Structures are given as structure tokens and as C-alpha cells.
């Protein structure tokens, strides 16, 4: 199904440039105190941007990964991993929840262990640049070809970052498929993919599978 020219899907990608803050924590109490003062940008980098880093599926943010792998506090790591950054209306609410989760843990275990030198948590920030990659598609067949080969940064921008722009767990892919191609069922199928259960390649694979099935169904209807 072809759509109007102004309804082309224009693939974009985001590139992040890492910037050190000079702040680091060697134990959980220091991490908690620094969470109060680091910039919103730093919170975003260590939570939202975690999905751009080829993350380990066991964790969902840098704080959880550090707590699990370096502090060896598996219970806290699980609690931090259960925090979904996309459910908060602003970064301050996310920051508050991270701190409260750590505070609750410190009440039970007030003497946190320290990590060896070199394993501290380093707070970083990022500068994010977004630009088109020169790929525009007008139907599902073209979309299917493109989604196979675009960079991971494209998948991240349109599936993850879009959630902060569009809200309500909506991504750019499903939005375009629903409103430009009038395929609501397919859009809902893509929208239902859990971003916490897959890395970017897993997201790509699920999108490809769903679109392939839809394209095949369209071809059978034509025949």
C-alpha cells in the first residue's frame, strides 16, 4: 500500500557523544548522594541511553548493572532494574525513585561495601545529535528492506527515544504504520514489544517478523 509523499517514513539516527562529569562513587551511599546532585542529562545517560549500549538483558540501567556486578547486591540490582524510566513524567521523578529505592535498601543494610579501585561508578553525560540517514520508505515492503539494515542507532531513536517524545509507550514505527498505512493491528503488535525484554537486535528481529507476516498476508490477498 503506497501513501502520499509527505507520509514517507524518514529514518533518523541518534549519535551520543560521551562527556565525563568527574564524579564517581565507590559505595552505595556515595552513589545515592551523587544522584541528588548530578545533572538530568547524567540520569538520562545512565537510564534511557542504557538501551543504546548493547546492554545485558539482566539489567535495565547502569545503576542496576553496577549494583549487581560490582557491589554484588543482587536484590538491589533487581529492584533498580524494575524501574521503568518511560513511566515518569520528568527526570526529577525518576531521580527521586532511584534515590528512594537505594534509601530503602540502606535502611536494611546500613554498612554498604566498597568496590576495589577501578570499579567505581563513574557518572557521565552525553550530548545527543539526531539526523536523517537518507532512507525514506513509502510502504511495508520498502520498510521491511530498510529495517533489516539500518544502524542500531536508528532502531533506538525510533523505538526507544520516541517513547519520550510521543508518550504512552508509542514508537515512531507503530505510529507511522497505523496512521500512514492504516494498519492498526500491525501497529499494536509492534507497540506491544517489550523494550525491557530485548536488546536492540531483538527489537529489530521482532519488528521484522511482524512486518514479514503482514507483507506475506497482503501478497496472498492480492493473489
Image (cartoon, helix red, strand yellow):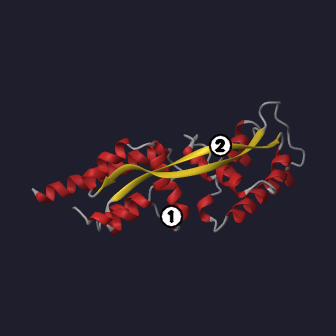
> Residue 36's image quarter?
bottom right
Q: Is residue 73 visible?
A: no
Which secondary structure, mark 2? strand
- Residue at mark 1: 169
Q: Residue at x 47, y 55 (%)?
A: 159
- Give how far across and how far down residue 56 sits, in percent: 58, 40
Where does the C terminus fall, quadrant-wise?
bottom left
Asked if residue 72 lies left or right of residue 183, the reply is right
| Crowd band around label 1 with a 10 angstrom C-alpha radius: few (<14), some (14–19), many (20+) | some
- Give how far across and how far down residue 4 sits, in percent: 26, 66
- C-alpha distance separating marks 2 and 1: 27 Å
In the depicted structure, whether residue 161 falls above or below residue 208: below
Q: Residue at x 55, y 45 (%)?
A: 52
First-in-chain label (2 vs 1): 2
Asked if residue 84 lies left or right of residue 197, the reply is right
Q: Which mark is residue 18?
A: 2
Which one is in front, 81 or 24?
24
Q: Residue at x 56, y 62 (%)?
A: 164
| Crowd band around label 2 with a 10 angstrom C-alpha radius: few (<14), some (14–19), many (20+) | few
In the depicted structure, whether residue 208 falls above or below residue 9: above
Amino acid at each position: 500500500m503506497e501513501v502520499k509523499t509527505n507520509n514517507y517514513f524518514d529514518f533518523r539516527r541518534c549519535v551520543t557523544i560521551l562527556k565525563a562529569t568527574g564524579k564517581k562513587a565507590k559505595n552505595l551511599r556515595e552513589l545515592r548522594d551523587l544522584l541528588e546532585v548530578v545533572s538530568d542529562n547524567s540520569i538520562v545517560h545512565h537510564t534511557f541511553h542504557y538501551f543504546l549500549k548493547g546492554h545485558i538483558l539482566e539489567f535495565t540501567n547502569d545503576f542496576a548493572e553496577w549494583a549487581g556486578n560490582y557491589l554484588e547486591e543482587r536484590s538491589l540490582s533487581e529492584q533498580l532494574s524494575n524501574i521503568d524510566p518511560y513511566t515518569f513524567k520528568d527526570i526529577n521523578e525518576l531521580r527521586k525513585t532511584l534515590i528512594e529505592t537505594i534509601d530503602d535498601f540502606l535502611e536494611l543494610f546500613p554498612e554498604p561495601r566498597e568496590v576495589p579501585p577501578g570499579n567505581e561508578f563513574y557518572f557521565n553525560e552525553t550530548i545527543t545529535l539526531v539526523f536523517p540517514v537518507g532512507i525514506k520508505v513509502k510502504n511495508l515492503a520498502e520498510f521491511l528492506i530498510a529495517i533489516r539494515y539500518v544502524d542500531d542507532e536508528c532502531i533506538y531513536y525510533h523505538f526507544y527515544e520516541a517513547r519520550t517524545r510521543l508518550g504512552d509507550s508509542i514508537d515512531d514505527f507503530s505510529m507511522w504504520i497505523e496512521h500512514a498505512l492504516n494498519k492498526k493491528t500491525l501497529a499494536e503488535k509492534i507497540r506491544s514489544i517489550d523494550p525491557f525484554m530485548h536488546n536492540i537486535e531483538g527489537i529489530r528481529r521482532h519488528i521484522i517478523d511482524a512486518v514479514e507476516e503482514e507483507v506475506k498476508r497482503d501478497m496472498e490477498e492480492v493473489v
